[in-house]
């Protein structure tokens, strides 16, 4: 499998995923909606397969108040969501919007649909 490249809008943050991603899904939770718009497309990857190539100093993190626990990463220059890269977890989500290459899989599930905004539709419903 060829690496899957990714980057933020301004190109400061660049990464690659060297292993097969675990899944691609759409999340409709209130946090993803606020960070990405109507919903967020998230690619689940193994931490060991994620390689940050450049821009570590440009990544900013937002740590929410409890009960929320997921730290959001984003580019401090352009604001692109990066996902939740972490050395503390075996797997984590990467914002699919940052992918430069086709991950080779299609969305398999809509998550947190109970939080979906009334009247909005996402691809496939």
Image (cartoon, rainbow, N blue to C red):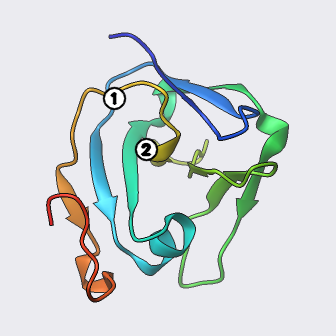
Residue 51 visible to an observer of this rendering: no
Residue 39, x across and y down, in percent: 38, 67
Residue bearing mark 2: 96
For the residues marked 2 and 1, what is the alpha-carbon distance in whole angstroms? 9 Å
Mark 1 crowdedness (10 Å alpha carbons): few <14, some 14-19, many ≥20:
some
Please indicate whether residue 60 sits to the left or right of residue 34 in the image: right
Q: Give the residue displayed 85% in from the left and 39% down from the top.
A: 57
- In the depicted structure, whether residue 30 falls above or below residue 9: below
Tell which residue pokes out farthest to the right in this image: 57
Q: Give the residue displayed 38% in from the left and 10% down from the top.
A: 2
Mark 2 crowdedness (10 Å alpha carbons): few <14, some 14-19, many ≥20:
many
* Element on which disc 2 rests: helix
53 and 35: which is toward the camera: 35
Please indicate whether residue 60 sits to the left or right of residue 117 in the image: right
Residue 56 visible to an observer of this rendering: yes
Residue 105, x across and y down, in percent: 23, 33
Please indicate whether residue 121 sits to the left or right of residue 86 in the image: left
- In the depicted structure, whether residue 124 falls above or below residue 18: below
- In the depicted structure, whether residue 50 falls above or below residue 93: above
Q: Give the residue displayed 45% in from the left and 80% down from the top.
A: 30
Quarter the C terminus occupies? bottom left
**Residue 90 sits in which quadrant?**
top left
Residue 71, x across and y down, in percent: 62, 62
Residue 68, x across and y down, in percent: 54, 78
* Element on which disc 1 rests: loop
CB under 8 Å between discs 2 and 1: yes
Residue bearing mark 1: 103
């Amino acid at each position: 499998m060829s690496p899957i490249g990714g980057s933020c809008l301004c190109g400061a943050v660049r990464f690659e995923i060297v292993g097969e991603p675990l899944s691609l899904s759409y999340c409709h939770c209130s946090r993803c909606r606020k960070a990405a718009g109507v919903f967020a497309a998230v690619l689940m990857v193994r931490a060991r397969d994620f390689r940050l190539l450049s821009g570590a100093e440009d990544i900013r993190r937002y740590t929410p108040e409890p009960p929320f626990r997921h730290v959001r990463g984003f580019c401090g220059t352009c604001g692109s969501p990066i996902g939740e890269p972490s050395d503390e977890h075996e797997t984590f989500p990467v914002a699919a919007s940052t992918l430069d290459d086709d991950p080779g899989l299609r969305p398999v599930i809509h998550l947190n649909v109970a939080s979906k905004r009334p009247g909005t539709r996402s691809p496939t419903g």
